[in-house]
Amino acid sequence: MSRVRADEEEYWHSSKFRAFTFDDEDDELSQLKESKRTVNSLRDIVDDDDDDLERVSWSGEPVGSISWSIKETASGSTSSLDGRDSSLQKGSSSYAALPKQGSSYSLSSLFKGRNKLSSFQSLSDALSDTGVKSYAPELRRPRAEYKVLIFLKRTLRREILFRELEVRQVALCHLIHFLREMGEQKFLLDLLRFLDRTEEVALSQYREHLNIQDVEKRREFLKGCIGLPFSAEDTSHIQDHYTLLERQIIIEANDRHLEMAGQSELFRKYPRKASILNMPLVTTLFYSCFYHYTEAEGMFSSPTNLKKTFKIPDKQYVLTALAARAKLRAWGDVDALLTTKNWLGYTKKKAPIGFHRVVEILQRNNAPVQVLQEYVRLVEDVDTRLNLATKYKCHDVVIETYRDLKDRIQLTAYKDKVERGSAEEEKIHSILSNMQIRWKN
Amino acid sequence: MAFAGRRDAPEPPDFGILKRLARDQLVYLLEQLPGKKDLFIEADLMSPLDRIANVSILKQHDVDKLYKVETRPAPGASDQFCFLVRPRVRTMRFIADVTCDEWSFYLLPLDEDIISMELPEFFRDYFLEGDHRWINPVARALQLLNSLYGPFGKTYGIGRCAKMSYELWRDLEDESESEVQGRKPEIGHVFLMDRDMDYVTALCSQVVYEGLVDDTFRIKCGSVDFGPDVTSSDKSIKVLLNSQDKVFSEIRNEHFSSVFGFLSQKSRNLQAQYDRRRGMDIKQMKDFVSQELKGLKQEHRLLSLHIGACESIMKKKTKQDFQETIKAEHSLLEGFDIRESTSFIEEHIDRQVSPIESLRLMCLLSITENGLVPKDYRSLKTQYLQSYGPEHLLTFHNLKRIGLLTEQSAGDTLTAVESKVSKLVTDRAAGKITDAFNSLARKSNFRAISKKLGLIPRLDGEYDLKMPRDMAYVFGGAYVPLSCKIIEQVLERRGWQGLEEVVRLLNGNEFCVSDSAVEDNPACESQRVILAVFLGGCTFSEIAALRFLGKERGCKFIFLTTAITNSARMMEAMIEAKG
């Protein structure tokens, strides 16, 4: 469906796109604000004692509901359902559920003191024992299919089972899903190998890393995954995963040390809120630009080392470094990132990500107007530039832009937005009285 | 069922029966265990159970304490334990050595026209894992609804799962002995649709109020948790969102832009109502307090909640460049400025805006463009892994398998696949052959379908979102939801005639069956009540669109879905979790 260029222009400027915007200036938002004021003003009149309304506990659950009751019980109130009114008075604010029991915990040991093996084996037993009522109402008919599959799985030699399943696609899917759910990793891998689904074998093995909490063990495991039969592309991703974790372990150990030693001002002023382990690469880069910006490339924790090792594209690098330096209010570093020098030694401001994004990042970190203004000025698109300049009160930029657009009406109107007797007002005056400008309105 | 002129839509059948049935069955089961007992409930069943029963009913049947299934009971527990669980493998590891009974709870009415099966795992289990385990409950649900509100006259459907569900349902009907014929039906037609017939709609940002609330706050079992930023206090509150909420019922299907005006009007009215107090004498005041005040208080409470919700939505959206995102989405839907949209997505990933959103946009690009250009696929994948974590390698594989995020291959023509297949016939690995056919079958063909069905409205003047002229309003006038358009067309034509091309592009599996025993009487009201069944999930935007269509055509749509869904839930289902 291709359109001619002119149509596209017309399309984007059509009213359809102005139907609804999320701008602060818009009627709709001020309408909403007005509604809120109206409703809030009525709050004094409305007696908010909630006696006619549904009673709600501190967690937000309606009193008397099942979710509420479970939370009440979990919070440790030993009263049974009778005591629910008094427990409401207590208004307990913490609802930490009792710690989850691991899968080896058997509730049956609570019944009659008998100790039975829990988890997977029980289910298999239950299903293949025809004496027990079939607890499988949801299974597709023939209802026997699951029972049959499991029975076959337990009785047939694998090779025969696999061969039979190969030509029964649906049953195969069912069994694979079942094996995954039950965590029967070895069986699953054997089956996949038999079917020559080598990539899936690799992925299934790789997937296991999610269950390894200990970082060292995880690192070892990932190292082992590198040789698996992935596609060439995925192999490099796995390699990167391993390398990243390896580096993170080193950085984490060093930084923990630094932090505890208490010598580094940076770490004292901005204590780390979380460990860098298992974080994505970009997050690690941000961290590195924050805490280790000036380090030499040889150091694993330096941003330039990360950039080189993981082949991080310039765009991503500048964006991330910018965000980190802006957070530290290091405006000089921000400037340096956006300045390039050509061979003649002339500097030029360049942003691989668009200056409106730069402005957004700076503004989020409360950059002073003088700093902000410099980059707002560089925003290419005029409408966006005006928008941002007005929003963030970069008066000079607004004035200059209206002057460049030769828009006398707007410039005059803007006079009201600047302070009486300020330099900006003076500036507007002098521009407006400039006879040489050929105003368009 | 032809759309002959505009008439008032018929009233929906009473689905309260379903709740009562479920509750009665539960009570019966509790009674099988006489005396004091503790009840352990699976987390996912808590909310549905809240809709059906409450604590006092359980107490009446000797339930002492309530626990989540994973919890260890406190000392002083009863001798008897009762577990309420879905037969899912992961729950079974907490339970052993029990006798089992079946609680036939398939259907939860969320509202007067929405019934949910509360099976969010249906989507992943069927469409990704190829597991058919949930087809039986769907068939049983149809059977139950048929027996209570049928007999259904005509059944339409499209999709493999729809076909299988239908066939299983017919088998169940044939085997059962219940006499349904001769009953006066309340629902005339059924339309079954697989989610994968239309992924595009499910992936789009929602802009009708209910959809926005779901996207922003996550509606669960018809209720939503509003935090302190909405309630303007330090409390959170759980609110039931259905037609009982007088404010909500009027704004739920509206495009977000209309909502402000409505709330503003309502607030002013409310103010005026309260102001009336000033001129009142004692008697009038008494009447006011006894009759009107409660209603006004309720309205005030609802209004503040929804105004708070709107504010919260606005804040979040402005933060996430909603405007730009919508612009990119519309480009993708319409098929131009694709490079610009791709750059937007790339930047979105670079900025680490949101892992779910970035994924969603990539999938939308892939589906509308029949897969990503290999260079883009590789580059975006690498960037995604760098921004959001290397473990998402697994997510990408899932998305590829299910067909949501694929790569265009050089040989995607029919001849190329044929030669691929013939080469594989000699290979003993049967799995690979199916893969080849699967990949062919999963080609999206969105652009061709969109053109054939006219899903992108022509622009002539401004699109009025307050008085919409077609279903495209649910997406700001930019796009008519494909799923809804298909339903509209098939019902209009009373079959698939004239839609052969579209069906072929959707990869077939369409059907249209009439129950000859059921009278096809156009005058009968049930003829104008249609059960729309979504296998794999249904979004609020689709619900709003079909409600609109219903009003236009004088018919009523009842929604039966395996679960309410949105783009975030779909993406989350594709991400590999621990354990």
Image (tube, rainbow, N blue to C red):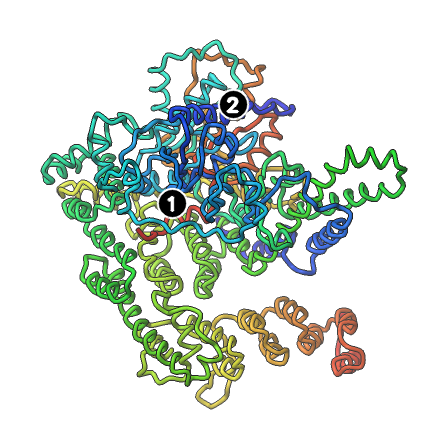
- Is residue B488 positioned above or below A313 on the image? above
- Pick the residue in front: A321 or B99: B99
Q: Indicate the position of residue B66 as horizontal and vertical percent values.
A: 44, 39
Q: CA distance from mark 2 to mark 1?
A: 33 Å
Q: Residue at x 41, y 28 (%)?
A: B35
Front label number (2 vs 1): 1
Q: Amino acid at mark 2?
A: Ile
In the picture, residue B442 is in which quadrant?
top left
The chain to which mark 2 is attached is: B
- Is residue A9 positioned above or below B198 on the image? below
Q: Residue at x 38, y 64 (%)?
A: B383
Q: Indicate the position of residue A350 as horizontal and vertical percent values.
A: 50, 78
Q: Indicate the position of residue B546 as horizontal and vertical percent values.
A: 55, 34
The residue identified by callout 2 is B17
Q: Residues within 10 Å of mark 2 (few under 14, many from 20)?
A: few
User: Is disc 2 placed on a helix, strand or loop?
Assistant: helix
The residue identified by callout 1 is B71
User: Is disc 1 placed on a helix, strand or loop?
Assistant: loop
- Residue B467 visible from this viewpoint: yes
In the picture, residue A206 is in which quadrant?
bottom left
Image-based side of A35 in relation to B458, left or right: right
Q: Earlier in the sequence, mark 2 or mark 1?
A: 2
Q: Residues within 10 Å of mark 1 (few under 14, many from 20)?
A: some
Q: Indicate the position of residue B269 as horizontal and vertical percent values.
A: 78, 42
Q: Amino acid at mark 1?
A: Thr
Image-based side of B371 in relation to B242, left or right: left
Mark identifier at residue B112? none
